C-alpha cells in the first residue's frame, strides 16, 4: 500500500460520514466489505429519508467550518461539499417520493444486494436468512414513501411502474430469484435447521415482492401519469448528480448529434472493410465467423478471464503502474439473468478482489467476441478495475470516502469509455471486428446523449418532425444499436426513468479527453501519458468539476 499520510480534521469528517452511511444503510458495509451488522436494510420510509437529510446537513456544516491542510484535503472538502449540497437540493425536489424505475431504484436495490453479500460458511448463511426475512420491512418503508408521493402528487411515470411490476413478479415467482437463491445457491451441507430457515425467509421475501407488485398495480399506477420527460429544472439536477459537473445541456445536445454522426461514419467505413457493404452486412459477416464464437457460459467465463489476465499483464509492463494486489481481477457469471455486465470493486484490504460480472439471459448460449472484447477492457483493465482498485490501493493518502464511495457516474463511466478508446490507441483493437464492436458501443453511448436530453427537455427531434417522445426514442435507438428489440426497449425505458444517467458515460469521456489534451498542452514535451494516468487515478473518485480542478491545479 502507499505511504501513510497523517489524517486531518477533514479526513475525520469524511470517515465519520462513511460510518454514518453504514449506520443508516447497512448495505453500504456490504459494498465496502466492512465488518458489522449487514442483516438489516436501511430505512426506506419518509422518516428514514429525513434522518439521512439531517445527517447530510450536519456533515456539510462541519465540513464547511474545517480548514484544509493540503491539496488532498482541498479535493475532499470541495468534492464532498458539492456532493452533500446537491443531496440537499435533490431532497428539496422530493425526487425520493417518485424514485421508481426499471434498473436502479430501491425496488431493484433491495434484491440486488444479495448478489454481493458474503456467502462463505454457515454463519454467513445465517445472516442471509435473517436479511431475507427483513425484505418485507424494507419494502414496507419504501411503500410508505411512494404513498406519500401519491398524496403530494409526486409519482413516477406509469411506464416505469409497469416495468417494475413485471420485475417484482418475476423475482417473486415459484422459480424466481428468492426460491432459487435459497434452494440452489446455498451449500448442501448447511444444517437442516438453517436450510429450513432459509426457505422460510425466502418465502417471506417472495411474498413481500408480490405484495409490493400489488401495491404498484392497485394504488400507485392509478395515481400515475404518462409523462416520461421530467423537464429542464429537474433534469439539470440529475445531470449534475451523475456528472459531478454542470454542463450546458443545449450545447451538449448539439455535440451529441455531432459525435453520433462521427461514430456512425467511422463504423460504416470499417463495415466496408469487413464485408464490402453496410453495417448490417458487416454484422452478419462477423456473426457468421466461427472463430469469433463462444459456446456456453463456462467458455465465456474462461474467455473473459484470459483476456482480462492478458490485459493486466501487458499493460502493467509499460502503460500503467499496476501494483500486485490490483492484478487480481475475478471474472464471474452473475447469479441473475437480466443481461447486464458490471464491475464490483475490491474490499479495502483486497481480501475480496475486484470482480467482473456477466448476467446471461435465460436461454442464451452463444456469444460473439467481436461484440465483447471492448466490454472486458471497459469493466476490467484499463477500465473500471484499474480506476477503482487504484483508489483503494492509495489508502495511505485517501480516506475511505475518497477511496470507496466518492465519485460520479461521469467520472467512472467516462473513464471506462476513455479506456476503450485508449486500447484502440495502443493497438489492442486493430482487428477490424473488435474495433467495429468498440465503435458500436461508442455509437450507442452518443445516441443516448441525444435521446436522454431530447426526451427529458422536450427538444425538437433530429428529423424535424415535432418533439421527442417515447415512440420516437425507441425508433431512434433501434436505428443506432445492433441489439435485439427487447434490449432496446429495456434500455430506452431505463433512460426515461433514470434521467441524466445514460449521457454521463459519453459526456464523462469527453471531459476526460479534454483534461488529457489540456494537460498535454500545458506540459508540452515533458508530458508523460503513463504519469498522467497515475496522477489522475491517484485522486480517486470525484465529480468531474473537482477532477478538472485537481488535475490541472486550478484552485
Image (cartoon, rainbow, N blue to C red):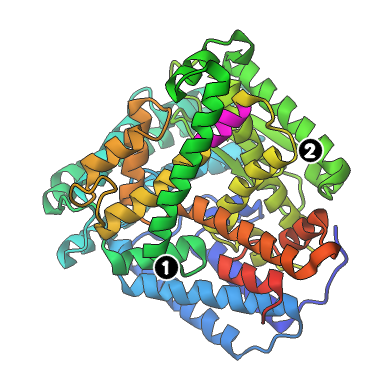
Visible residue check, residue 213:
no
Instruction: From the viewer's perspective, tell me whether residue 494 is left or right of residue 152.
Output: right
Quarter occupied by residue 35: bottom right
Q: Quadrant of the N terminus?
A: bottom right
Q: Is residue 391 magenta?
A: no
Quarter occupied by residue 436: top right
Find residue 490 and report its horizontal and vertical position in percent. 34, 36
Looking at this rendering, what residue extends furthest in the left direction?
Answer: 222
Q: Is residue 435 magenta?
A: yes
Residue 282 vs residue 538, the one in the foreground: 282
Residue 391 vs residue 531, the one in the foreground: 531
Residue 3 vs residue 232, the one in the foreground: 232
- Mark 1 or mark 2, which is nearer to you? 1
Q: Which residues are magenta?
A: 434-440
Q: CA distance from mark 1 to mark 2?
A: 37 Å
Please report the residue visible at 57 percent of the width from the left and 65 percent of the height from the top.
544
Q: Secondary structure at mark 1?
A: loop
Q: Which mark is residue 312?
A: 2
Quick check: 127 above or below 242? above
Please report the residue visible at 58 percent of the width from the left and 18 percent of the height from the top.
297
Instruction: From the viewer's perspective, tell me whether residue 300 is left or right of residue 70.
Output: left
Find residue 333 and report its horizontal and vertical position in percent. 58, 27
Question: Which residue matches tag 1?
Answer: 248
Instruction: From the viewer's perspective, tell me whether residue 122 is left or right of residue 363.
Output: right
Magenta span main SS: helix
Amino acid at each position: 500500500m502507499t505511504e501513510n499520510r497523517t489524517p486531518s480534521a477533514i479526513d475525520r469528517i469524511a470517515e465519520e460520514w462513511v460510518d454514518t452511511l453504514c449506520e443508516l444503510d447497512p448495505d453500504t458495509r456490504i459494498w465496502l466489505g466492512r465488518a458489522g451488522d449487514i442483516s438489516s436494510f436501511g430505512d426506506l420510509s419518509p422518516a428514514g429519508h429525513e434522518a439521512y437529510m439531517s445527517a447530510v446537513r450536519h456533515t456539510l456544516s462541519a465540513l464547511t467550518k474545517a480548514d484544509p491542510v493540503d491539496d488532498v484535503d482541498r479535493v475532499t472538502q470541495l468534492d464532498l461539499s458539492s456532493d452533500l449540497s446537491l443531496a440537499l437540493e435533490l431532497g428539496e425536489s422530493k425526487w425520493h417520493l417518485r424514485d421508481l424505475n426499471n434498473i436502479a431504484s430501491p425496488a431493484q436495490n433491495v434484491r440486488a444486494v444479495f448478489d454481493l453479500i458474503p456467502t462463505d460458511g454457515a454463519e454467513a448463511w445465517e445472516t442471509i436468512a435473517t436479511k431475507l426475512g427483513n425484505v418485507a420491512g424494507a419494502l414496507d418503508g419504501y411503500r410508505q414513501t411512494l404513498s406519500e408521493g401519491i398524496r403530494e402528487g409526486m409519482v413516477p411515470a406509469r411506464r416505469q411502474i409497469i416495468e417494475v411490476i413485471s420485475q417484482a413478479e418475476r423475482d417473486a415467482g415459484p422459480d424466481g430469484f428468492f426460491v432459487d437463491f435459497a434452494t440452489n445457491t446455498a451449500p448442501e451441507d448447511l444444517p437442516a435447521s438453517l436450510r429450513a430457515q432459509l426457505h422460510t425467509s425466502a418465502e417471506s421475501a417472495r411474498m413481500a415482492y408480490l405484495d409490493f407488485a400489488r401495491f404498484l398495480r392497485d394504488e400507485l399506477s392509478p395515481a400515475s401519469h404518462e409523462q416520461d420527460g421530467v423537464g429542464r429544472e429537474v433534469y439539470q439536477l440529475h445531470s449534475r448528480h451523475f456528472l459531478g459537473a454542470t454542463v450546458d445541456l443545449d450545447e451538449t445536445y448539439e455535440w451529441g448529434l455531432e459525435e453520433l454522426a462521427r461514430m456512425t461514419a467511422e463504423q460504416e467505413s470499417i463495415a466496408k472493410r469487413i464485408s464490402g457493404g453496410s453495417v448490417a452486412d458487416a454484422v452478419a459477416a462477423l456473426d457468421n465467423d466461427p472463430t469469433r464464437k463462444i459456446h456456453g457460459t463456462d467458455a465465456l467465463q474462461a474467455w473473459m478471464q484470459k483476456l482480462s489476465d492478458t490485459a493486466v499483464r501487458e499493460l502493467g509492463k509499460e502503460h500503467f503502474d499496476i501494483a500486485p494486489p490490483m492484478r487480481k481481477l475475478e471474472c464471474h457469471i452473475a447469479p441473475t439473468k437480466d443481461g447486464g455486465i458490471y464491475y464490483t470493486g475490491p474490499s479495502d484490504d483486497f481480501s475480496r478482489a475486484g470482480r467482473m460480472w456477466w448476467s446471461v439471459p435465460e436461454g442464451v448460449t452463444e456469444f460473439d467476441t467481436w461484440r465483447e472484447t471492448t466490454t472486458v477492457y471497459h469493466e476490467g483493465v484499463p477500465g473500471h478495475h484499474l480506476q477503482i482498485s487504484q483508489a483503494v490501493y492509495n489508502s495511505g493518502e485517501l480516506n475511505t470516502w475518497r477511496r470507496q464511495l466518492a465519485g460520479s457516474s461521469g467520472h467512472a463511466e467516462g473513464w471506462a469509455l476513455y479506456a476503450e478508446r485508449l486500447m484502440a490507441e495502443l493497438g489492442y483493437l486493430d482487428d477490424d471486428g473488435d474495433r467495429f464492436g468498440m465503435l458500436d458501443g461508442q455509437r450507442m453511448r452518443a445516441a443516448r446523449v441525444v435521446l436522454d436530453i431530447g426526451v427529458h427537455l422536450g427538444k425538437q427531434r433530429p428529423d424535424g418532425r415535432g418533439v421527442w417522445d417515447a415512440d420516437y426514442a425507441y425508433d431512434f435507438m433501434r436505428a443506432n444499436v445492433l441489439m435485439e428489440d427487447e434490449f432496446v426497449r429495456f434500455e430506452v425505458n431505463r433512460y426515461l426513468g433514470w434521467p441524466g444517467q445514460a449521457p454521463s458515460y459519453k459526456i464523462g469521456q469527453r471531459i476526460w479527453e479534454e483534461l488529457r489534451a489540456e494537460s498535454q498542452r500545458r506540459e508540452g514535451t515533458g508530458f508523460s501519458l503513463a504519469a498522467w494516468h497515475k496522477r489522475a487515478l491517484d485522486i480517486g473518485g470525484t465529480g468531474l468539476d473537482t477532477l478538472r480542478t485537481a488535475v490541472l491545479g486550478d484552485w
